[in-house]
C-alpha cells in the first residue's frame, strides 16, 4: 500500500472514530458502546496499516476525544482501554501461542486498565460518582469486578469475531477491489 493510501485510510478511520465519540453527547446511554465501536474501527488499521499506524490512529482519537467529545467519561473509557485493546489483542494473539497464557495476559491487562481508568476518573477528573463506587460495600465491589471480567470476555470474543469477519468477508469483497 502506498504512503498516501495509508494516510488516507488512517485519516478516514480517525474521522469515523471521532464521529462515534461525538455521538456520545447525543446518545448518552451509549457511553460504553460508542467508544467500543470507535476502538473496533482500529481493527481495519491493524490489518491494513500495521500496529504502528494503528497506534497513531488511536493516539489521535484519544487526544481529540479529550478536547472535543461531549462526555469526558467516554473519552476516558476510550483512552484507558476500549481504544487500544484491539491493537493490543492482535499483538498478544500473534506473539503468544498458549491460549491459557493469552487469557491470563488479557485479563491482567483489562484489570490494570480498569484500575488506571478508575484512578484517573477519581483523581484527575474529580468524578465523584466513581469514588462513591469504590467506597461501596466490599461485596458489591467484588461482584462488580467479577461481572466486569465476564463482560470483558464477551467483548474479547466479539472483537475476535469482528476481526475475522473483516479479514475474511468484508476485505476480500470490498477493499481489495479499491486498493488495486
Image: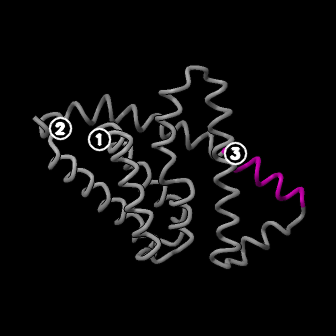
Query: Where are the magenta residues, as a range?
Result: 138-150
Q: Separation of disc 1 and disc 3 at Cα?
A: 30 Å
Which percent across, then down, holds residue 47?
33, 37
What residue appears at the point 61 percent right and 29 percent down from the top-left corner? 102
Q: Could you classify mark 1 by the number of other residues whose Cα lies within 10 Å: few (under 14), some (14-19), or many (20 or more)?
A: some
Percent position of residue 137, x then y: 90, 64
Q: Secondary structure at mark 1?
A: helix
**Which residue is the site of mark 1?**
49
99 falls in the magenta region:
no
* The C terminus, quarter of image: top left
Which label number is shown at residue 149? Answer: 3
Discs 2, 3 touching: Cβ within 8 Å: no
Instruction: Tell which circle, 2 or 1, labels the residue nearer the N-terminal end.
Output: 2
Marked residue nearer the N-terminal end (1 or 3): 1
Query: Which residue corresponds to mark 2?
Result: 1
Whole-percent x, y for residue 92 in the image: 53, 33
Amino acid at each position: 500500500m502506498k504512503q498516501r493510501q495509508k494516510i488516507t485510510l488512517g485519516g478516514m478511520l480517525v474521522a469515523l472514530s471521532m464521529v462515534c465519540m461525538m455521538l456520545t453527547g447525543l446518545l448518552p446511554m451509549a457511553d460504553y458502546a460508542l467508544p467500543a465501536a470507535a476502538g473496533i474501527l482500529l481493527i481495519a488499521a491493524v490489518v491494513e496499516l500495521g500496529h504502528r499506524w494503528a497506534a497513531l490512529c488511536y493516539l489521535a482519537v484519544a487526544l481529540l476525544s479529550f478536547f472535543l467529545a461531549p462526555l469526558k467519561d467516554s473519552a476516558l473509557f476510550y483512552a484507558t482501554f476500549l481504544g487500544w485493546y484491539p491493537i493490543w489483542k492482535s499483538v498478544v494473539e500473534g506473539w503468544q501461542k498458549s491460549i491459557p497464557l493469552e487469557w491470563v495476559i488479557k485479563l491482567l491487562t483489562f484489570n490494570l486498565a480498569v484500575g488506571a481508568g478508575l484512578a484517573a476518573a477519581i483523581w484527575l477528573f474529580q468524578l465523584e460518582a466513581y469514588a462513591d463506587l469504590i467506597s461501596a460495600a466490599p461485596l458489591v465491589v467484588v461482584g462488580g469486578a467479577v461481572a466486569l471480567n465476564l463482560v470483558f470476555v464477551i467483548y474479547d470474543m466479539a472483537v475476535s469475531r469482528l476481526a475475522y469477519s473483516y479479514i475474511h468477508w468484508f476485505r476480500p469483497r470490498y477493499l481489495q477491489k479499491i486498493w488495486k
